[in-house]
Image (cartoon, rainbow, N blue to C red):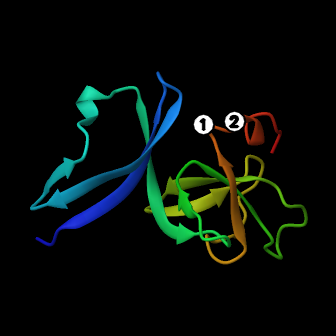
Amino acid sequence: MENSRYKFRAWCKKGKEMITDFWIEAKDGECFGKYSMQAYPEWELMQFTGFKDKNGKEVYEGDIITTNAIRIVNTYPLNVIFMDGGFYPFCKSNSYGVSLGDGIEVIGNMYENPELWSGQNR
């Protein structure tokens, strides 16, 4: 079996801080990581999507993004979620056909900037 390495970051609920450079490596059907998740149950993991925004910033699950996609009349904040085996921008009121490609910009994340997402009826 080929080794796979998955990049994450983690939100520490207790300390209210983002832990970066977090990874999990799958080797021969087993997972190994930099940290033991049993030792840190207060952490929320967010996987790196493999994409960068228009400014070169890495896009993670849980990020709040905007886009200049043609299909969206207003630039609503979108939350990056993992669903059906892929990463997608999600709006509370609609599901838009937007991909994590050119034109997106990370403006925050749902843990450090909840006001960008939770206070809106979208």
Q: In the shown orientation, is residue 2 left or right of residue 108?
A: left
Examine the rendered structure and indicate whether residue 76 appears above or below residue 35.
below
**70 or 103: which is nearer to us?**
103
Q: Quadrant of residue 2?
A: bottom left
C-alpha separation, residue under disc 2 versus residue under disc 1: 6 Å
Label of residue 56 in the image: none
Q: Position of residue 112 (x, y in %)?
A: 63, 37
Q: Left or right: 73 with respect to 64? A: right
Mark 1 burial class by Cα count in 10 Å: few <14, some 14-19, many 20+: some
On the rendered image, what quadrant is the C terminus found in?
A: top right
Viewer-proximal residue among 7 and 90: 7
Q: Secondary structure at mark 1?
A: loop
The residue that appears at 27% across and 53% down in the rendered structure is 24
Three-letter amino acid code at the position of disc 1: Tyr
Name the image quarter holding the N terminus. Answer: bottom left
Q: Nearer the viewer, residue 87 or 46?
A: 46
Vertical position of residue 56 compared to residue 74: above or below = below
Left-right relation of 20 to 71: left
Look at the picture and state if 50 lies above or below 112: below
Q: Residue at x 82, y 55 (%)?
A: 76
Residue designated by label 1:
111
- Mark 2: amino acid: Pro
Residue 114, which numbered label?
Answer: 2
Q: Quadrant of residue 115?
A: top right
Label 2–label 1 contact, CB within 8 A: yes
Neighbours of disc 2 within 10 Å: few (<14), some (14-19), many (20+): few
Residue located 23% across and 48% down the image: 33
Work out which residue is located at the far top of the displayed protein and give it. Answer: 14
- Residue placed most toward the observer, 18 or 89: 18
